[in-house]
Image (tube, coloured by chain):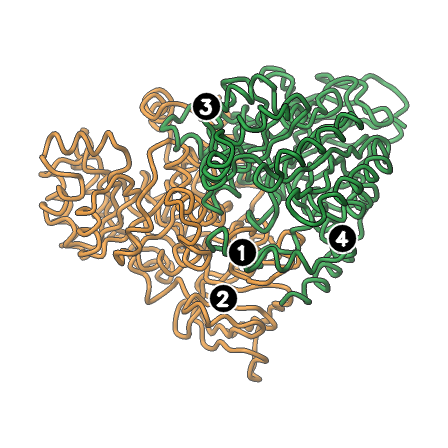
Chain colours: A green, B orange
Amino acid sequence: MKLLIENVSIVPMTANDESIEKGYIVIADNCIEKIGPGEAPADNYEQRLDGHNQMALPGFINTHTHAAMTLLRGYADDMPLMEWLEKKIWPLEARLTAEDIYWGTMLAIVEMIKSGTTCFADMYFYMDEVARAVEKTGIRAVLARGMIGVGPENEQALTESRELAGKWQGKANGRIKFILGPHAPYTCPPDYLRKVMELAEELNIGLHIHLAETAGEVADITRIYGKTPTAHLESLGFFEHSVLAAHCVHLTDEDIAILAKYQVGVAHNPESNMKLASGIAPVPKMLEAGIPVALGTDGASSNNNLDMLQEMRTCALLHKVNTSDPTVIPAYQALEMATVNGARALRLSSETGQIKVGMKADIILLNTAQAHLIPCYDLVANLVYAGQASDVNTVIVDGNIIMQDRVLKTIDEKEVLSQAQRICARFR
Amino acid sequence: MKLLIENVSIVPMTANDESIEKGYIVIADNCIEKIGPGEAPADNYEQRLDGHNQMALPGFINTHTHAAMTLLRGYADDMPLMEWLEKKIWPLEARLTAEDIYWGTMLAIVEMIKSGTTCFADMYFYMDEVARAVEKTGIRAVLARGMIGVGPENEQALTESRELAGKWQGKANGRIKFILGPHAPYTCPPDYLRKVMELAEELNIGLHIHLAETAGEVADITRIYGKTPTAHLESLGFFEHSVLAAHCVHLTDEDIAILAKYQVGVAHNPESNMKLASGIAPVPKMLEAGIPVALGTDGASSNNNLDMLQEMRTCALLHKVNTSDPTVIPAYQALEMATVNGARALRLSSETGQIKVGMKADIILLNTAQAHLIPCYDLVANLVYAGQASDVNTVIVDGNIIMQDRVLKTIDEKEVLSQAQRICARFR
């Protein structure tokens, strides 16, 4: 099966000067076979997409979310963190069934595809349902069953994670990857983390953890272990595994050096950190240290959306004002964070995050013929500073068109919206 | 002419508990005649809009922009402020013709209407062209010819402003209002500001000024006049006029007390202030002091869009993280800033900014049946934290439908986009 995208502007994210004003992309099966300027070589293309007035770029990679939390979007906002968690979020989460998680994840995937996300990293529960939704919808995902070491279900979380990895690893033509999800240093004591690391070693898979999200966490961990959360994890040998660390808001310079040394993937979640008033992560410093810093939305209950274009823009703007330096995180770097850095952070950079021969075809097309994207002196600046989710016109994952002209091809969108509304009626 | 909007959710912005889950709005000529829950009273309605799956709210009020600067969108980004101005923005602005300003403003108005803005405050040049664009498109505007007191054109700016006010005041069925636009304390010396104030008094009109945007400005003014910019303007009697002050980033507590005492309208431009790394305005303190703080996008060259939904969300998120308090600027207050506070800041609160009997019908309808707005526990939280410009479906200004189902009724959108592209080709 050969698919040709022609007459399209291409931002391949291989290097800042490698954009193509008008060119073509050939997709053979699930991979990118050719890319170039001008007209495509003649061939037997089963399918053609006209890219006139469109730009092609690698799909966005949302490196930290809890997809099914779309069911809690707007359920409680503008509250102090612990009150929000204890009085609102946790009690509602305790009521969620496996079926709820399936439809909540489907709702999230609809929103993600419609805003150009082609791959996401999820940490939640009933992950069998999440994997089913990923399989069905055609999106790519790195999944982890959240593991709490202090609760009664800590052993079950290990057993389930082993089963999930056994059942789903590499399934859906390789679109599904399972890793382990020890929730955070403050919910997973050292003994438990050691068990998690043993399992990671046995299964040869990575780890997804929340790290240094709040000042309170840093104070607590430092009081108990005499070390920052990052230094604490290092001392346990945690970073000798492939680690994706979400948030990393409160870091010392030594912490940054540790994350750089082990090339820990960092999922920066600027909007969630702002909305919960957690703080501002030292992203420019982390980037300078060579850490693969990527972007995530976090769950829709603390954002309240899964829109990676917004996350990119907010990231670029936030760090400029925070450092009093308008040159910090220029547009291209913000777009790198949302694409190629996302792939690095998820250890998928040989597969996705760039439009490059041999990589999986995870590509989005955006409609550029719109008032808010005119004039166009700089495609990338327009995209980052003025792009909207609704500009995403076509989404291709693993070589399959899963949205065309804003119509979802693998999902009955109406059914998903109505199932989500039915479920949420219970929580009013 | 009677227009009925029925079966619609209404957020009137009169008070937080006055939202209507399903109701109607009757518009007679250019004003709101009735509003209520349930079914509308029987009457001879010439036109009906079905509000099923839509929410109605007052149109957004963009209290500070330079509309024609859409022509400079993405022309130069991620640069230090003075280099950006001196090497990029000012040289290009010097090349803009009256015709450019017309089409640049048209482009801005297309973007504004499509993102739900029904009224904007503009400060730029060739304002005759701007007024023509406002008249033609059906939007509402408060216009000011930018006045630089130190340049060779300082007298001309006074003469032109007088002529513009004479020609346009109250025109287009009252949709156009002219005020004076002394650019800033650092470009308008006291003698010049006195002349401006005399003219404002003579014409009985207000003033639109940039105030305390950067730390550099505050340092310069303090060095020259021994006072902060705000205290300096107060000492000149400036605030005895109706003043709209843009930015107000660097303020002392005394400055805030002055702005509160005179009820100066403040146009807060969070995204521009972030992008240029100007700083973070003390908005929660200003709101607490009772200052009518509204929102603006600033020009598209420092934003780079005119999307008030984004501005609202950024405002709410930015001040939460800046104050380490997630309860600061809750969703409803952010929406107030974008609507009712905008009207207060522009001295239009008897006309617009709320859906209320007797007010002008400046109303927008947003499509709520979308993945990113589901579930809906709280209409306002969904709108502020997850709403997108493209959710705006219908826009009514002064009782006229100027966009319906995302189709502009008063503007040939294709022509505007192509004229803007033609003009900007000169600047490449």
Residue B48 image-quadrant placement? bottom right
- Crowding near pointer 3: few (<14 within 10 Å), some, many (20+)? few
Foreground: disc 1 or disc 3: 1
Residue A215 in the figure: left or right of residue B254? right
Residue contact between numbered discs 4 and 1, judged by CB atoms under 8 Å: no
Q: Are marks 2 and 1 on the same chain?
A: yes
Label whose residue precedes the other's in the sequence (1 or 3): 1
Where disc 1 sits, the SS reads helix
* Residue type, numbered disc 3: Phe
- The image shows residue A306, relative to residue B409, as above or below, that is above
Mark identifier at residue B427: 3
Label whose residue precedes the other's in the sequence (2 or 3): 2
Q: Chain of mark 3?
A: B
Residue pointed to by mark 2: B11
Residue contact between numbered discs 3 and 4, judged by CB atoms under 8 Å: no
Which residue is located at x 72 percent, y 30 percent?
A: A363
- The image shows residue A341, relative to residue A71, as above or below, that is above
Residue A96: image location, x then y, percent = 71, 58
Residue pointed to by mark 1: B383
Which residue is located at x 81 percent, y 26 percent?
A: A4
- Crowding near pointer 4: few (<14 within 10 Å), some, many (20+)? some
Residue B331: image location, x then y, percent = 46, 56
The reply to whether residue B420 is visible in this rendering is no
In space, the residues marked 2 and 1 are separated at their CA atoms by 11 Å
Residue pointed to by mark 4: A413
Residue A74 in the figure: left or right of residue B135? right
In space, the residues marked 3 and 4 are separated at their CA atoms by 43 Å
Residue A418 in the figure: left or right of residue B5? right
